Amino acid sequence: MAFLSLLRPDRFTVALVTTALLATFLPATGAAAPILKMVIAGSIALLFFLQGARLSRKAIVEGVVHWRLHLMVFAATFILFPVLGVLTKTFLESHFAPGIALGILYLCLLPSTIQSSITFTSLAHGNVAAAICSASASNVLGVFLTPLLMGLFMQTQGHVSFGEIGEIVLQILVPFAIGHLARPWVGQWVEKRRTLTGIVDRGAILLVVYYAFGEAAINNLWRRLAPLDMLVLVLVSCMLLAAVLALTTTASRLFGFSRRDEIAIVFCGSKKSLGSGVPIASILFPASMIGAVILPLMLFHQIQLLVCAVLARSYAERGNSARDSAC
């Protein structure tokens, strides 16, 4: 019964599915698309401002110096995932078109997401300070490591625009730093209004889901593959995600990490960034290949949002049950 209760959708999961369906049939196009991107950027900036205001200086320092946790996340992102990607590409390249098979490997070489990794860590009551440091560092390093790894595996040549780093700093780290500096004045107010922070967290996720599914619809994601090929690609994405989630969870427990640290490792180590993946792909690959290469990434990105929403809920409910039992 406890397992079945986890499968029962809550309001947030229903909202995720509803948002995905709405975006599929009514995506943001024309003048609405850049407005939506600005709203998403604003919501993410607000989210990190509130996170900075909530976190104490001690928690931030502990997050920065938590090198064992960061090493686990980097190992999952840039060692475990690439190994799985090479094996999967080798096994499936005779089934898929070359661009799709290459896209599976490319997906596995990308850095972690920032906003969804940290948001899900927050929703699951994990170590948010460590997640912010680890996910941000992964994303910045990925701007360099992804082209290098792609070149190592596929002899792909290209250069990387450093504008991505500035965008990450402005959208993530600057609001967080401002929020933390403002903590003496707004910290107590934010702490007393956790419902507001929860609305911002969930709102940011819903906006990202709407944008991702809308882009998929606009780019005819569901029409580029035969139904059987699409099913295989969905299963491959689910298997990759399940393998990394299982291995990061098991490794976190074997190495004695706390529950809060485990949550940060699982959510930061299992994500792949659509925001970084698409711009980097436009540099590394010719225009004729980009659509096929990013197709697995677009699909995986949407699956990881839905699966991790359920997983975050499970972590949160188990944490609440443990606290109730302790009381």
Image: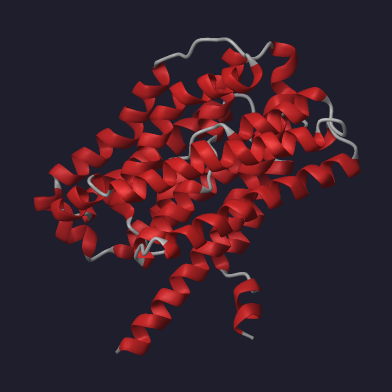
Residue 208 is left or right of residue 220, and the answer is left
Count of marks, rendered view? 0
- x, y percent for residue 197: 34, 57
Please tell me which residue is depicted at 60% across the width and 74% down the height of the picture: 6
In depth, the one of 100 and 33 nearer the eye is 100
Q: Vertical placement of 171 versus 122: above or below? A: above
**Quarter in which the N terminus is drawn:** bottom right
- x, y percent for residue 99: 76, 23
- x, y percent for residue 143: 45, 24
Q: Going by the picture, which residue comes out furthest to the left?
A: 184
Question: Which colour scheme appears in the figure?
Answer: secondary structure
**Quarter in which the C terminus is drawn:** bottom left
The reply to whether residue 138 is in sight is yes
Q: Going by the picture, which residue comes out furthest to the front?
A: 254
Residue 101 is left or right of residue 116, and the answer is right
Name the image quarter holding residue 191: bottom left
Please tell me which residue is depicted at 52% across the width and 38% down the height of the picture: 79
Please tell me which residue is depicted at 58% across the width and 10% down the height of the picture: 157
Residue 297 is left or right of residue 308, and the answer is right
- x, y percent for residue 218: 72, 30
The reply to whether residue 123 is in sight is no
Q: Vertical placement of 261 versus 1: above or below? A: above
In depth, the one of 30 and 157 nearer the eye is 157
Please tell me which residue is depicted at 27% across the width and 49% down the height of the picture: 66
Residue 184 is left or right of residue 28, and the answer is left
